[in-house]
Image (spheres, helix red, strand yellow):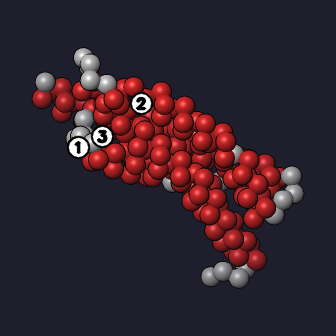
Amino acid sequence: LWEHLESGRARLMVVVPLTFLLIFVLLFITFHSAGQAALVFTGIPFAVTGGVLSLLARGMTLSMSAAIGFIAVSGVAVLNGVVMLAFINQNRQSGMVWAEAVRNGAASRLRPVLMTAAVASLGFLPMALSTSAGAEVQRPLATVVIGGLATSTLLTLLVLPTLVLSWASRRKEQSDGTAE
């Protein structure tokens, strides 16, 4: 059993960084901007933070199933960031200034982002509370997903719009030649 755990951890040490690199490349292809890809990518550390805090709160340790939960919650965090930023970009293309585009985007995407997080969290809730056979595998995975979704949803709704405005103002300063 210990050999299988070590083998799985070794594979995850290769697969996880490659997965995150692939996610970043796909975000770059989607937005044609490393800056916007990085903005969406910020959802991953917030999701991981929520997952770690939820494991600690429930007295659980990092296991293989919890590690898989981190990968799953990272995907949902990125999806919510893409939904938000794509709509903000759409607002910009329709002629809105950055502040208006971000405000409108955050307000318009509030419901879809909350629904995505709520559906995933509610779907994992029975696994998180399970005490039946197999619960030792299900509980850590579900705990990570639910905790990670809580923090990444807050990021997407509150922090991401602020980061987008900050990024846009820095780009404007650089294009105006006023930034050093």
Q: Callout 3 environment at 10 Å: few (<14), some (14 to 19), or many (20+)?
A: few
Q: Nearer the viewer, residue 124 or 44?
A: 124
Asked whether residue 109 is in view, the answer is yes
Task: Using the numbered discs, state the Cα–Cα distance from disc 2 to disc 3 in whole angstroms.
Answer: 28 Å
Q: Which of 162 and 107 is in front in this view?
A: 107
Q: Residue sitting at 33 percent across and 29 percent down?
A: 129
Residue 173 as seen in the image, left or right of residue 119? right
Q: Name the residue under label 3.
A: 13
**Residue 180: x percent and y percent?**
62, 82
| Mark found first going from the N terminus, 2 or 3 | 3
Q: Residue sitting at 58 percent across and 51 percent down?
A: 156
Residue located farthest toward the left when viewing the structure as drawn: 2
Relative to 123, does residue 27 appear above or below in the rendering?
A: below
Q: Which of marks 2 and 3 is in front?
A: 2
Q: Mark 2 points at which residue?
A: 125
Relative to 78, does residue 154 appear above or below in the rendering?
A: below
Q: Residue sitting at 60 percent across and 63 percent down?
A: 163
**Residue 148: x percent and y percent?**
43, 44
Q: Nearer the viewer, mark 1 or mark 3?
A: 1
Q: What element carries label 2?
A: helix
Figure quadrant of residue 130 = top left
**Residue 149: x percent and y percent?**
47, 42
Q: Which amino acid does label 1 sit on?
A: Gly
Q: Residue sitting at 34 percent across and 45 percent down?
A: 54
Q: Nearer the viewer, residue 164 or 111?
A: 111
Q: Mark 1 points at which residue?
A: 59
Q: What residue type is labelled 3?
A: Met
Q: Which amino acid does label 2 sit on?
A: Leu
